[in-house]
Image: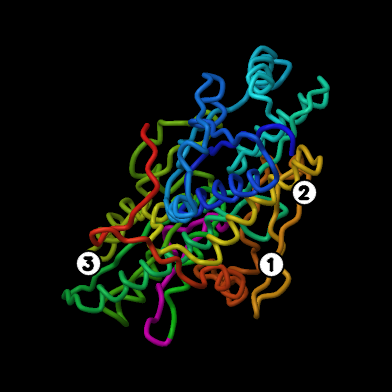
Amino acid sequence: MKGNVIVGQSGGPTAAINSSLAGVYRTAKDRGAKKVYGMLHGIQGLLQERYIDLSEHIKTDLDIELLKRTPAAYLGSCRYKLPEIHQNKDVYEKIFEILEKLDIEAFIYIGGNDSMDTIKKLSDYAIVTGKRTKFVGCPKTIDNDLALTDHTPGYGSAAKYIGTSVKEIIRDGFCLEYSNGVVTIVEIMGRNAGWLTGAAALAKGEDCPGPDLIYLPEIPFDLDDFSKRIKELLKKKGSVVVAVSEGIKLKDGRYVCELGSSVDFVDAFGHKQLSGTASYLASFVAGECGCKTRSIELSTLQRAASHCASRVDILEAFQVGGAAVKAADEGDSGMMVVIERFSDDPYQSGTAVKDVHKIANDERVVPRSWVNKEGTYVTDDFITYVRPLIQGDVAPIMVDGIPRHLFRPY
């Protein structure tokens, strides 16, 4: 590698996103990159010429290990949508002017669907204008909804946290006793894909019955059927736990969360901010059944819980970061690194690269065959798929009883 590398992070963070950053940095240095720059707050920060030399912040092997265990986006994130080339060519000229000034040979972007859209547009512009910089995407999203990859780094750790938390919530419910019972609604991230919510089923085992109902956004939600099922469950048990995706919708297309309050905020990519599904359903159940209800929104905890990270997830995140640099160094551009699964037991996987044009702006949802006929739970096939991804632990480096992270002054 003769030139320099620049790396950025975009979209929602994960417990493993910085492990990919560590993989990019380590591999770039091993392959001879003179400098490895980090964009501060992704492509939006680069447009403002906000970047750092990572070697000034990552100086030792201990720093690499700390970075792998640090949640959230170390470099800062953004949700900035690049315009189409024909709409604003000036933006692209500015970006490439900065890249040329920094002698950037490889541009690595760690992110999800919208981030791959950025890689697609930049690589297309580079081809049209004959620029030498190579653009490679590094997958990241707890939503696990990227096309052409078996799964995405960040998902395994989030799934592990969700399965653990739901199990603890169920255990807590066992110790409560109310005359009319108690219903707990757990809201889990997932706009259009239910990979995260399905992970609630991981709580089920010899020592735990698991959640009573699981609702994914892939299946239209029926309030009347939901009410009927809750009433039947309350006849049999005192504590009922339900896991729901934040993005569950009625047959008419309305989000359930919109029944309780308006959803006004929309981001640069046109995504509505979803929140309040569990709160609405808890109020609905209280009115329908006259029982005590609780709503729990896992929110950012499911993507920030590095203390509950999966070892498989952290290792694969590091590997895809390195694979992205390797691909760019070997001449690939307009590509994304993917994870290929070779077997479930023993679990074996590897990396490859796929055309980002077949990935960007697409969403991979949970197969209908992995949800039961009633649409109220996931099947054993889903569990077989996700269980290998949550295996192993990554022990935090503890200082004074609290995990230590790699700090970067903002």
Q: Which quarter of the figure is the C terminus placed in?
A: top left
- Residue 193 point in image, percent of width and height: 56, 54
Q: Which mark is residue 160?
A: none
Q: Which mark is residue 291?
A: 3
What is the secondary structure assignment of the residue under circle 1? strand
What is the secondary structure assignment of the residue under circle 2? strand
Q: Residue at x 69, y 58 (%)?
A: 339
Label 2, label 3: how many angstroms apart (C-alpha)?
A: 51 Å
Inspect the image, locate mark 3, and give the three-letter code of the amino acid beneath it: Cys
Q: First in sequence: mark 2 or mark 1?
A: 1
Q: Are marks 2 and 1 in contact (CB under 8 Å)?
A: no
Outermost residue toward the top in this view: 90
Q: Are marks 1 and 3 in contact (CB under 8 Å)?
A: no
Q: First in sequence: mark 1 or mark 3?
A: 3
Q: Residues within 10 Å of mark 1 (few under 14, many from 20)?
A: few
- Residue 353 point in image, percent of width and height: 76, 50
Above or below — where is 367 with respect to 45? below
Q: Residue at x 67, y 16 (%)?
A: 97
Would you name the residue on which mark 1 appears? Answer: 349
Q: First in sequence: mark 2 or mark 3?
A: 3
**Picture quadrant where residue 47 is located:** top right
Q: Residue at x 65, y 51 (%)?
A: 322
